[in-house]
Amino acid sequence: MSIAVLGAGAFGTALAASLAQKGPVTLWARDPDQAKAMQTTRENTRRLAGVKLPANVSVTSEIASAFASDTLLLAMPMQQMAGFLNSHAETLTGKTLVSCSKGIDLATGQGPTGLIRSLVQGARAAVLTGPSFAADIARGLPTALTLACADHSEALQAELSTPTLRLYRTTDTTGAELGGALKNVYAIAAGTVIGAGLGDSARAALMTRGFAEMLRVALALGARAETLSGLSGFGDLVLTCTSEQSRNFRLGYALGSGAGFDAAITVEGVATAKALNALAERHQIEIPVAAMVNALTQQEISVSEAMQILLARPLKEE
């Protein structure tokens, strides 16, 4: 089996470097200049500086080279995925497409596997998600992820596992992709709490209530509770709510502290908060923390107003 990673951001580059431990990997970059520079210098100086690419990673901007592979890992921002799949639907027919994106499509309310199934005929849809930072994966630090695929494929699990990247499989694609998407929303909230100086106790409370919201939404949409309690849900929530490596946490910290934030950095939790609130309204699910995150990121309320609204909620049983 041959593997290609589509998307040369930090995470796509890291996955290509890790998978190269087992054989040749094609890494596709949209920008021809970036692809040429990476192929020459053997480094992604834009997104993952300091990490050398193994010799058997071939970097290209020619999409046909990537499409020649049997298994394609889609490592692109969630809001770009539908357009990419639509543009290449015929070529991707019958391929194994593994989404590495974490989010909800704003236009349709679907997760990545839903988009793949609806837009690409005969494609085998899977999702790779869980607690991971690109720098850790690229440097060969031990990482465990969830691989969700409806056919429970042991072969795909073996193909994408490496000596330092351990995959656990599940058939619950809905739960896996919701865990990976929703935790970004609560990472923004956690960063806001710390940035505003509200303390670690407040962050712990927020993470706990945020997880309750994640579980509430996932169960309403047909996911299994045990999936959300695993790597793709609780595990990813813990990582992104407690580390400054998380872009979502850093955005929240900037909101809480009043500091600036680089608008060029992709923060999936902003779009996910908006999509999540639309889903919750449609299904009549109560998500007060996520609602405050959406209002904050849309600049509808201040941090102090969000805190007052949450603390003024009626007392209730846990």
Image: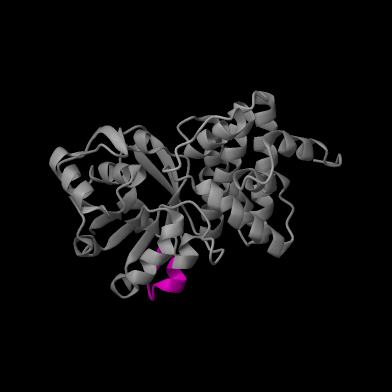
Q: Residue at x 19, y 43 (%)?
A: 38
Can residue 259 be seen here? The reply is yes
Please provide percent x and percent y for residue 44.
25, 40
158 in relation to 117, above or below:
above
Task: Give left or right: position of 25 versus 139.
Answer: left
Q: Which residues are magenta?
A: 116-125
Task: Give left or right: position of 289 versus 90.
Answer: right
Please provide percent x and percent y for residue 277.
65, 55
Quadrant of the drawing holding the C terminus: top right
Of residues 301 and 151, the one nearer the viewer is 301
Residue 40 in which image quadrant: top left
Magenta stretch holds residue 124 = yes
Residue 292 in which image quadrant: top right
Colour scheme shown: one colour
Can residue 24 be seen here? The reply is no
Q: Residue at x 54, y 67 (%)?
A: 108
Q: Residue at x 50, y 59 (%)?
A: 171
